Image: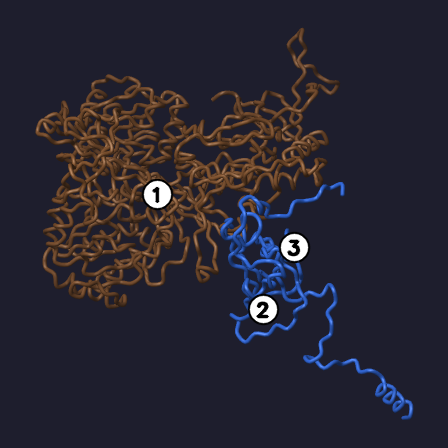
């Protein structure tokens, strides 16, 4: 009996392992796979080029992409193509991260958001506005008006393989 | 039959006709030799070097001329010091080909490494990505890494519009010249070419407007990379997201087989949307090609102007009502209206709907008329093409006569195939009142004046052209240019008489082919639906007028006037046409992309089309509307499914006897093999898995058939006298067909807007002078009591005394007639 009480006393004196969620939150691990984010370049242009490779890689068929064409007057991303519609159905998503692997421009990244709750099926569909990260400091929101001939490459140029 | 040549490819023995290329022989036994520049429909050039294989031939002893044998008694094979191109090497007896060896693999790897030195590798945004031969072959045979320095990649323009239909990406081009060769060899539109050389080589277009070819879309199919893409599909979807659905083109009587690519789109509320139209292989009809009208003019089905609800006339207005109300109103109208029921059917209505319409009219004691301005379809069902016919079989010793038709504009695929037949050695005789594009390939050109068409046939009957009368097989294509209904009927009769005299009927590859304006006009004739000699009177005398898929009021003001006299009008349509505006009840029909059914082509081939997109919620297929109306009137009509209607049709219509809906969906092996995993070979044309269709047997093949009464003795020289008309101060106003017209199914495709034919009168300068008209200035003419002002265009190649005007370009000219042309002195600004 004393042995048992001793354990209780010991535990009473030690730091509790539980935390007061949601007031207090545990930091997530660097490789945590939370809600997706669509990244931007420093100048504010979207990294996503609407190639739909994430949708092709998705084993749960949770991603839907519709592409459209950029112009210099109305530019969303570098190159010719951008995602006009980008939707992820979070009820379908299994957070496997294949979309991240498939992305040729590192536009879609599984972030550290894990607080997802919906009351209807419709609200489980996250649209592009909800997924896009805010415009970084010094950048401009999209669509941007850009100089012709500057943003001609959709996929960032590859480096010399010798490097 | 020439002796077949036997060779060994990778240990497999294959026998092929002499002249076959190694790459095709290998394909026949399922061995893939990768290619970029070679295409089975075009002459080989051996530019890309991707098809390098090891080829050995039996050693021949020079002294004896006999093959050298080894110790086992087998011929000794001598391989060349280097690899050979399989696409330019014809097979020889005893040849040994090795496609799987270290040497061949490394050659392929090197070729791909070179091709990729300057390729942008922007596959993620490339429309071809996913169905790209370069991508596939690189995955299959290419190196994983390049030894070339990336900074040295060429940076060229990525968005070059070659005209408004096709975009060029100069970086992606691998310089295989398939597009250039297609336009030169197959389409005869030499508007593309190479400029510069080496790494700076690029594709350019010479024409104005850019890429001025009606077959331009095909170059995007055969382009082995994403260098040529269509403006219509640009970034539309990735190929793997698309679902294929089989359909038919309904723009002309050729009946090209299509595969329509659809997908569900969020922007359209999750509806199925047509993303693009691709050719589906049918070597009997369109081979693997498609004209640009068929490829790009499909948007009408998704047009926001479609009729979506039934409408009933209340006073001066058409108000939308429920189906139940509209059907009841139509049934009441038919019952309460005295007089005959006259139904008018358009040539774009499928067979099943025409059959149901005929049943309905027959049981009500009415009649069905066909809306067409050409006659002779009854003769075509007697002496038309028979089962087993294929225009691709026509060659040396055969003859083709094309009269009064501009096939390049009316039926582009027939033009393509007749041109190919002429190249194979067939005698192509083109008779026309004005020059047409086909004449360049003709072995004989006959020029006549409008009204003298019968005289041309008389010359044939007199035996002036032995290449026709003595030909093994002969086909006549007749059109209706410059003639009215009676004129074309007379011409069809004359042609039938000629075919019967020379014995060119009732066997494969012989017969009469009509160049109708609509997809299923021949189907209507086969079902016993004929046009009327005096449509205006029929319309005016009708009690109930039932118009399905036709727009008489929009075509001709006199018909519009006649329609006013009918007491009750029911219209089934896709759009609110002029005719629909006059109706008492309007039913919204379904477009052919939304339903299934069959069409009969001008070659009398019955083919099936399948549902592609979901129908608009409140629309119904034409046959169902007719059957439901029949139900209201107490008539038992089959309206549940086209398959059931077709079963009835096949038992009760003689020319369809023996046909079966499922038989229409049967396929057979076709050559070249396209559309499987090997996109590098034939391009992205789809394989035909949904049916090649069946050709109807001709009435002349049946026992107890008697030749129809044609002209006994000599034919009249003129159908009308052009000189006398000119002497009266009139010109013969001839409506001509332009491919890109202003029809209701074409104009919703905004991409083609620039290319649509403009309303203008084309005249010979001498004729213009007589009427005091000048080039570019407007002329005034009276049509159906209304006055129109149309710009004049002078053209020295046109016949004198006639004026040409494009069909369905805003002017109501359905058949030719004499008009007065006057210069407009003061232009009226409206």
Q: Please give the name of the residue rendered at 91% of the width and 92% of the height, measured from the top-left corner.
A: A2
Is residue B447 in view from this perspective? yes
Q: Mark 2 points at which residue?
A: A91
Picture quadrant where residue B758 is located: top left
Q: State whether discs 3 and 2 lie on one chain.
A: yes
Number of residues whose C-alpha sits closer than 10 Å to that of mark 3, classed few (under 14), some (14–19) or many (20 or more): some
- SS for dot 2: loop
Where's residue B560, x and y in %? Answer: 15, 50
Q: Chain B is drawn in which colour?
A: brown
Disc 3 from disc 1: Cα separation: 52 Å
Number of residues whose C-alpha sits closer than 10 Å to that of mark 2, classed few (under 14), some (14–19) or many (20 or more): some
Most extreme residue toward the left is B728
Residue B624, disc: none
Most extreme residue toward the right is A2
Residue B606, disc: 1
> In this rendering, is residue B468 above or below A74?
above
- SS for dot 3: loop
Where's residue B277, x and y in %? Answer: 43, 46
Q: Nearer the viewer, mark 3 or mark 1?
A: 3
Where's residue B458, x and y in %? Answer: 19, 22
Q: Mark 1 lies on which chain?
A: B
Q: Mark 3 points at which residue?
A: A106
In the visual, does B756 lie left or right of B734? right
Disc 3 from disc 2: Cα separation: 23 Å
Q: State whether discs 3 and 1 lie on one chain.
A: no
Q: Which chain is blue?
A: A
Picture quadrant where residue B702 is located: top left
């Amino acid at each position: 009996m004393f042995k048992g009480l001793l354990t209780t006393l010991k535990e009473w004196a030690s730091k509790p392992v539980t935390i007061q969620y949601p007031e207090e939150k545990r930091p997530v691990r660097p490789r945590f796979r939370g809600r997706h984010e669509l990244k931007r370049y420093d100048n504010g242009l979207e990294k996503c080029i609407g190639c739909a490779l994430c949708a092709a890689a998705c084993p749960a068929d949770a991603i839907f992409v519709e592409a459209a064409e950029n112009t210099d007057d109305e530019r969303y991303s570098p190159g010719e193509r951008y995602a006009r519609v980008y939707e992820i159905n979070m009820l379908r998503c299994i957070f496997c991260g294949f979309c991240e692997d498939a992305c040729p421009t590192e536009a879609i990244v599984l972030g550290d958001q894990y607080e997802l709750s919906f009351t209807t099926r419709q609200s489980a569909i996250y649209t592009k506005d909800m997924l896009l990260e805010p415009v970084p400091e010094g950048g401009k929101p999209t669509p941007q008006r850009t100089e012709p001939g500057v943003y001609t490459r959709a996929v960032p140029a590859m480096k010399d393989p010798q490097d | 039959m020439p002796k077949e040549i036997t060779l060994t490819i990778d240990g497999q023995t294959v026998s092929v006709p002499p002249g076959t290329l190694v790459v095709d022989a290998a394909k026949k036994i399922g061995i893939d030799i990768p290619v970029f520049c070679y295409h089975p429909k075009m002459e080989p050039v051996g530019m890309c070097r991707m098809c390098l294989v090891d080829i050995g031939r039996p050693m021949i002893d020079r002294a004896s001329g006999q093959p050298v044998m080894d110790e086992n008694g087998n011929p000794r094979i001598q391989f060349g010091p280097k690899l050979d191109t399989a696409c330019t090497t014809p097979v020889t007896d005893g040849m040994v080909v090795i496609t799987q060896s270290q040497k061949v693999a490394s050659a392929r790897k090197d070729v791909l490494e070179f091709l990729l030195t300057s390729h942008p590798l922007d596959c993620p945004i490339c429309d071809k990505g996913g169905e790209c031969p370069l991508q596939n072959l690189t995955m299959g045979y290419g190196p994983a890494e390049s030894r070339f320095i990336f900074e040295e990649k060429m940076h060229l323009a990525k968005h070059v519009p070659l005209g408004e239909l096709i975009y060029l990406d100069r970086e992606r081009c691998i310089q295989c010249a398939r597009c250039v060769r297609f336009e030169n060899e197959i389409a005869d539109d030499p508007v593309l070419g190479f400029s510069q050389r080496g790494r700076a080589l690029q594709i350019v277009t010479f024409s104005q407007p850019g890429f001025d070819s009606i077959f331009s879309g095909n170059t995007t199919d055969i382009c082995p990379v994403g260098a040529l893409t269509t403006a219509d599909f640009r970034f539309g979807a990735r190929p793997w997201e698309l679902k294929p659905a089989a359909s038919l083109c309904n723009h002309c009587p050729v009946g090209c087989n299509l595969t329509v690519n659809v997908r569900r789109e969020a922007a359209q509320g999750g509806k199925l949307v047509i993303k693009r139209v691709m050719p589906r292989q049918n070597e009997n009809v369109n081979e693997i090609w498609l004209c640009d009208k068929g490829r790009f003019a499909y948007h009408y089905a998704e047009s926001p102007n479609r009729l979506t609800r039934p409408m009933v006339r209340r006073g001066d207005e058409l108000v939308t009502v429920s189906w139940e109300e509209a059907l009841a109103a139509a049934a009441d109208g038919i019952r309460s209206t005295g007089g005959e029921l006259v139904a008018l059917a358009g040539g774009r209505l499928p067979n099943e709907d025409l059959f149901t319409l005929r049943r309905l009219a027959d049981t009500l004691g009415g009649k069905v008329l066909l809306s067409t301005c050409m006659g002779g379809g009854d003769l075509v069902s007697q002496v038309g093409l028979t089962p087993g016919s294929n225009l691709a079989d026509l060659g040396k010793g055969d003859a083709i006569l094309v009269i009064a038709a501009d096939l390049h504009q009316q039926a582009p695929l027939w033009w393509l195939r007749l041109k190919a037949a002429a190249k194979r050695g067939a005698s192509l005789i083109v008779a026309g009142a004005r020059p047409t594009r086909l004449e360049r390939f003709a072995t004989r050109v006959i020029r006549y004046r409008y009204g003298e068409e019968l005289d041309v046939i008389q010359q044939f009957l007199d035996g002036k052209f032995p290449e026709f009368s003595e030909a093994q097989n002969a086909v006549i294509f007749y059109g209706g240019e410059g003639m009215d209904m009676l004129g074309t009927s007379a011409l069809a009769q004359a042609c039938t008489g000629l075919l019967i005299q020379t014995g060119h009927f009732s066997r494969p590859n012989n017969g009469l082919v009509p160049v109708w304006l609509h997809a299923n006009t021949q189907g209507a004739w086969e079902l016993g639906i004929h046009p009327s000699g005096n449509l205006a009177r029929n319309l005016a005398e009708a009690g109930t007028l039932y118009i399905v898929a036709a727009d008489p009021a929009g075509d001709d003001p006199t018909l519009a006037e006649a329609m006013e006299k009918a007491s009750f009008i029911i219209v089934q349509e896709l759009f609110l046409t002029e005719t629909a505006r006059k109706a008492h009840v309007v039913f919204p029909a379904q477009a052919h992309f939304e339903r299934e059914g069959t069409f009969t082509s001008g070659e009398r081939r019955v083919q099936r089309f399948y549902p592609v997109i979901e129908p608009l919620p409140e629309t119904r297929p034409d046959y169902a509307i007719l059957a439901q109306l029949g139900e209201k009137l107490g008539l038992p009509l089959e309206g549940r499914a086209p398959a059931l209607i077709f079963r009835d049709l096949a038992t009760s219509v003689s020319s369809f006897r023996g046909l079966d809906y499922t038989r229409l969906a049967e396929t057979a092996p076709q050559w070249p093999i396209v559309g499987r995993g090997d996109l590098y070979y034939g391009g992205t044309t789809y394989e035909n898995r949904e049916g090649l269709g069946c050709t109807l047997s001709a009435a002349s093949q049946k026992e107890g058939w008697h030749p129809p009464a044609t002209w006994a003795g000599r034919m009249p020289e003129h159908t009308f006298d052009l000189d006398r008309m000119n002497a009266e101060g009139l010109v013969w106003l001839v409506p001509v067909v332009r491919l890109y017209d202003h029809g209701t199914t074409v104009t919703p495709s905004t991409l083609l807007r620039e290319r649509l034919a403009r309303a203008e009168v084309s005249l010979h300068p001498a004729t213009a002078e007589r009427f005091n008209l000048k080039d570019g200035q407007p002329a005034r003419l009276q049509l159906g009591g209304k006055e129109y002002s149309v710009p004049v265009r002078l053209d020295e190649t046109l016949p004198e005394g006639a004026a040409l005007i494009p069909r369905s370009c805003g002017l109501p000219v359905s058949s030719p007639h004499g008009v007065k042309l006057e210069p407009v002195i003061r232009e009226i600004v409206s």
